[in-house]
Amino acid sequence: PPFWTSATVRSCWTCRLPMTGTCFWRCSTRGRTSTLAPIEEPVLDRLGDVGDIAQGVAYLSSPAGGFITGTTLELTGGEPLLQPAAFPLLEDLCDAGYEVLVETGGGVDVSAVDPRVRRILDVKCPGSGESEANHWPNLDALRPTDELKFVLADENDYRWARDLVLERGLASKCPVHFSPVHGSVDLQALAGWILRDHLPVRLQLQMHKFIWSPETRGV
């Protein structure tokens, strides 16, 4: 089945969401991996390594797999770009006619990603415990089709992200999302900070956690 995108300007569009299992991040803020239910079929919508995921390309690109030209497919994880095979896989998916997104934790050089792929970079804030591991040269090589996401655990994270966006002019390079950790940040307060500071960013919520219970898996 398709899933809902939640981390991009395509938020709340349906997409295929293959997820790799390998990750070097040890963030205190948990991502979406824990919300996925195991899937038995050998197709892309499963948690695993790139080698497993690649086996599903032919299936999903066939009528039996429900392929439609322009179908959105987002490769995430884990950290998908830790696996060298992810780079040719992304290229193959573009060649197959998918609209391809990759969501990366921001600690890996993204320069080798196929230019047809929309790169979504998490910028790790101090509240994650991993801000020192950001690969800062990525911010110097942003394209208009890229997107940045800051996951905010508290007001300190907001101030840190705000200053980085303004000092480096990030919003003029690509869309920027401020995404609060679900249940950890007062949403009205966060909206007020953004308005007060005239910050050119998108307030991005994890909509699947509002539509369903935050514990619901497989959405």
Image (cartoon, rainbow, N blue to C red):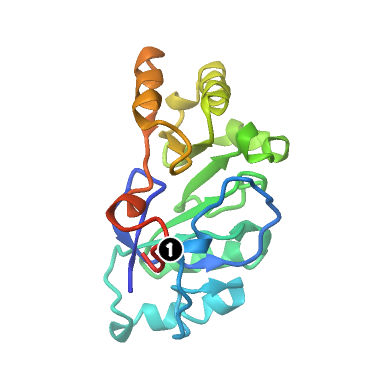
Q: Give the residue displayed 57% in from the left and 46% down from the top.
A: 29
Relative to 148, residue 59 above or below: below
Instruction: Please state which of residues 24 and 116 is positioned toward the viewer in this rendering.
Output: 24
Q: For the point 31% across and 58% down, which residue is it?
A: 212
**Residue type, mark 1 in image:** Cys
- Image check: 47 left or right of 188? right
Is residue 33 depicted above or below 11 in this figure? below
The image quadrant of residue 132 is: top right
Which secondary structure lies at badge 1?
helix
Count of marks overlaid on the render: 1
What residue is at 68 percent from the left and 39 percent from the top?
Answer: 129
Tell me residue 25's x, y (percent): 68, 51
Q: Quadrant of the N terminus?
A: bottom left
Most foreground residue, 140 or 73: 73
- 118 up-or-down from 59: above or below: above
Task: Please tell me how crowded label 1 is: few (under 14), some (14-19), or many (20+) other residues with Cα within 10 Å.
Answer: some
Identify the residue shown where x is 34% and y is 54%.
208
From the viewer's perspective, tell me whether residue 107 is left or right of residue 7. Answer: right
Q: Quadrant of the C terminus?
A: bottom left
- The one nearer the camera, 20 or 154, is 154
Q: Quadrant of residue 28?
A: top right
Q: Quadrant of residue 95?
A: bottom left
Query: Could you say where residue 202 lies in the image, as x and y percent from the top left?
Result: 36, 32
Q: Measured from the top left, where is residue 154 in percent x and y?
A: 53, 30
Relative to 161, 217 lies left or right = left
Side (left or right) of 163 relative to 137: left
Mark 1 sits on what residue?
A: 94
